[in-house]
Amino acid sequence: MVEHALPANAAILAGGLSEARTEAERATLIEAGRQLFTKPCTFFYASQKIDQLPPAEGPEIAFCGRSNVGKSSLVNALTGQNALARVSHTPGRTKQLNFFNLGDQLTLVDMPGYGYAQASKSVKADWQGLMFDFLRGRATLRRVILLLDARIETKAGDRAAMSLLTEAAVPFQIVLTKADDAKPWWLKQRIAEAEKLAREETAGHPLVLVTSSRTGQGIPELRAEMASLARTA
């Protein structure tokens, strides 16, 4: 019924960039993302076990990717805080879920990296078990941002993560990182491949974003996508 229709801006936000039909709608989304990330973002919880999670009280977006994909750098770039997410000098070291409160409108979840070559089989098995339990059981988890390195080919671990997300019925969106360090011809191939991978998984989001934490490329667009999932103030 008409009386239950969303306000115009709210309807635009709900659809995200993939549903934007005009430059004005796109600009509305970009501005919403900018405003969201002017709010304070603070660490508030860490968990190494599935029975130690914080209460599920609002929309959450999780960041997932191979070790050394640039996940911490991207979170820092999004929030404008150089040390919010710790950048480890030893890939694969972080083994816990880290939770960050973004202006009481959105919770960011930094998931442990996967696929580190020197990690033992038991560590990799623990990651899969913990992550699947978290993904499957977290009702407030709106989307997983799955990071792929723009400079290198998609690894078996990346494909396994996509299958895991689909099995857990959690929507995921592919975001390419470190785009500033990829040759244009290669980046074009990587984008096409990522779009194909997203289409092949029922949980895959159709819009692939290309980012660089160093140059800021794609940061406004990713913020806009995240704003479409946030709780309105």
Image (cartoon, grey):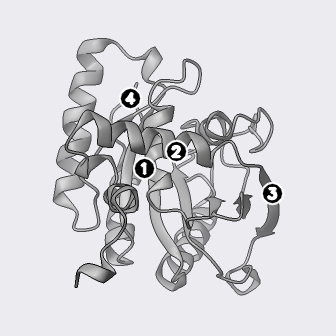
Q: Earlier in the sequence, mark 3 or mark 2?
A: 2
Mark 4 highlights which residue? 152
Residue 187, percent across and down?
30, 22
Numbered disc in front, either 4 or 2? 2
Q: Earlier in the sequence, mark 4 or mark 2?
A: 2
Distance from the alpha carbon under mark 3 to that under mark 2: 20 Å
Mark 2 highlights which residue? 33
Mark 3 highlights which residue? 43
Q: Is residue 108 left or right of residue 10?
A: right
Q: Earlier in the sequence, mark 1 or mark 4?
A: 4
Res. 58 image quadrant: bottom right
Q: Are marks 1 and 4 in contact (CB under 8 Å)?
A: no
Callout 1: SS: helix
Mark 1 highlights which residue? 225
Local packing at callout 3 (Cα closer than 10 Å; few below 14, some 14-19, many 20+) is some
Callout 4: SS: loop
